[in-house]
Amino acid sequence: MGIGRQIKHFTSLVVPRWLLFRGRMAGRKVALSFDDGPHQEHSPRILDVLGQAGVKATFFVVGEEAEKYPALVRRMLEEGHEVANHSYGHYALLDASPADYLADVLHCQKVLEDICGCDLEKSFRPPYGSIPPLVFLKLIRLGFRTVFWSVDSDDSRVEEAGQLVERFSRKPLVSGDVVLLHEDYRHTLEALPVLMDTVRQKGFDLVRCQDL
Ligand SMILES: [Zn+2]
């Protein structure tokens, strides 16, 4: 397991449950969220799979990657998905001062809005689920919603699609849950159709975070 995966594993364990985002529970809805894209190879295929299933999702994209693949970001938006902010440089909490962290988030928002040519929902997911308290409060004042997750798909803990499907199928879901997925794992892409079926078979509609 590489260091990046270890960090993802560690931080998802230490995020306090009370900080995890839950929706307003209207209807039976579960949101799928994809972090760390856009990914040159996987994003187009994820979009194809979502499109074939008629599912809209939320993509928390990294500004630095969005600049490399702007057409993929525009495609996400054009196909009805939510494009949201996952920071410009994907800083970890200990790597940046609060001021630098905030500047990085705001820079990402500008990059994404320039690429999309429109204002976007001010929706931010902290890299590794960690955010300095001062930045958290400042973002609220600036109109941002900080969106964590309530169900980790465990795609950062497994190596192949079968394991991911098996783990995910055992997770209890409630309306308003936000499922954490990643764009950079091939097994997530491969498991995606079954993961969506699993949620739907439990009686939930699949929506964007902004629809919860
Ligand atoms: Zn991330």
Image (cartoon, rainbow, N blue to C red):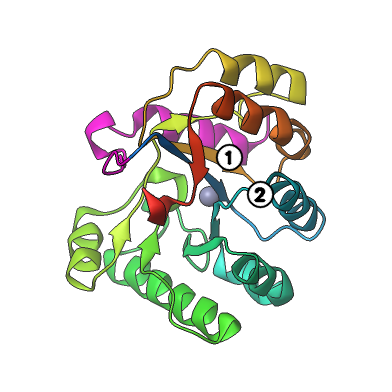
Q: Which residue is mark 1?
A: 181
Pick the residue in front: 155 or 48.
48
Vertical relation: 152 (above or below) 47: above
N-terminal-most mark, 2 or 1? 2
Q: Is residue 69 magenta?
A: no
Residue at horizontal 55 percent and vertical 87 percent from the top: 117
Question: What percent of the width, then of the height, locates residue 202?
Answer: 51, 21
Q: Quadrant of the N terminus?
A: top right
The amino acid marked with disc number 1 is: Leu
Residue at horizontal 35 percent and vertical 71 percent from the top: 100
Residue at horizontal 70 percent and vertical 44 percent from the top: 53
Secondary structure of residue under mark 1: strand
Pick the residue in front: 54 or 155.
54
How far apart, in angstroms, are the residues tagged by discs 2 and 1?
18 Å
Q: Which residues are magenta?
A: 1-26
Q: Which residue is mark 2?
A: 54
Question: What percent of the width, then of the height, locates residue 72?
Answer: 71, 68
**Which-is-in-front pick, marks 2 and 1?**
2
Q: Is residue 160 visible?
A: no
Left or right: residue 58 versus residue 51 is left
Vertical relation: 125 (above or below) 157: below
Residue at horizontal 55 percent and vertical 51 percent from the top: 57
Question: What percent of the width, then of the height, locates residue 74?
Answer: 65, 74
Crowd around label 1: few <14 · some 14–19 · many ≥20 (10 Å): many
- Residue labelled 2 has its Cβ within 8 Å of some atom of ligand 1: no
Crowd around label 2: few <14 · some 14–19 · many ≥20 (10 Å): few
Left or right: residue 39 versus residue 141 is right
Vertical relation: 121 (above or below) 21: below
